Image (cartoon, rainbow, N blue to C red):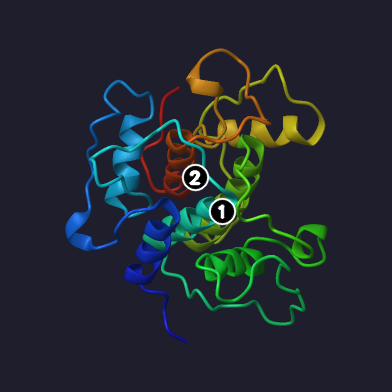
Amino acid sequence: MKLFSSIKLLAITATAIGFSALPGLAQTTFSDIEGNVYKTEIEEGASKDIVKGFPDGTFRPDETVSREQAAAMIVQAINSIVAIDINSRPPQRTVQPFSDVPDDRWSAKAINWMQWNLYPANVSQLTGNFRPEDPITRIELVEFLRRTGELVSLKLTGSPELDETVEPIAFSDVVGYNEVLTSQMSAFCRVASPLNEEGDAFAPDEQATRDYAVAAIVRAVTCESQEQPSS
């Protein structure tokens, strides 16, 4: 099977965000992120072709991210760490494609790959609608990234276990499963972090902005290999 090339992934990601995917137009610095708390991760994400800016040189950090844009960025991010086959499907799986993601949709390959490779068999998320154009919430993004981190960890270390690299955060506005999820992912290189990196609120139902989305994705895929943060 043919490996999913970086050029194809780059084209998908660029289409998602509305600008040219030509390699010559790649940029890693932007005119509107100076002072942004996620500046370092934004530039790292751009250097890995996870995300790009706009023709006017801006990044537009406060714009929201759709669920399909998040899927495209996550697949590209995984591919930047471990080579993947965009057409790979685990054996003995009978999952039906999402009914609202036709094969000719620009994001279909990325969404289908996530469906087949990031989710276990026999769970309810594998049928029905993906809602590709809906803005992704912060908690939805972190759920995607827990599975992303587990896959990358499995590829790099042989185990899907996510190591606790920093002290977990007890967010003030999450309960039940979301509390467990955000605590785990806050301890994993701060993939889950407070809204705007301030206070103790996670804001689970807030729509994820471009700056946080890219930062969280970069943290999730690089956590196993990077020098761990001290706080």
Q: State yes or no: discs 1 and 2 in contact (Cβ < 8 Å).
A: yes
The disc placed on residue 220 is 2
Q: Secondary structure at mark 2?
A: helix
Return the residue found at the far top.
199
Q: How many marks?
A: 2
227 relative to 128 in the view: left or right? left
Q: Badge 1: few (under 14), some or many (20 or more) residues near its Cα, within 10 Å?
A: many
The disc placed on residue 148 is 1
Quarter of the picture containing the C terminus is: top left
Q: Residue at x 17, y 59 (%)?
A: 24
* Residue 218 horizontal/vertical position (percent): 42, 44
Seen in the picture, residue 123 relative to 108 is either above or below; the reply is above
* Residue 230 horizontal/vertical position (percent): 41, 25
111 or 179, which lies in front? 111
Return the residue found at the far bottom.
1
Q: If you read the primary sequence from the N terminus, does the residue marked by circle 1 or circle 2 appear first?
A: 1
Q: Place residue 20 in its image quadrant.
A: bottom left
Q: CA distance from mark 1 to mark 2?
A: 7 Å
Q: Is residue 94 visible?
A: yes
171 or 39, which lies in front? 39
- Residue type at the position of mark 1: Thr
Q: Badge 2: few (under 14), some or many (20 or more) residues near its Cα, within 10 Å?
A: many
Q: Secondary structure at mark 1?
A: helix
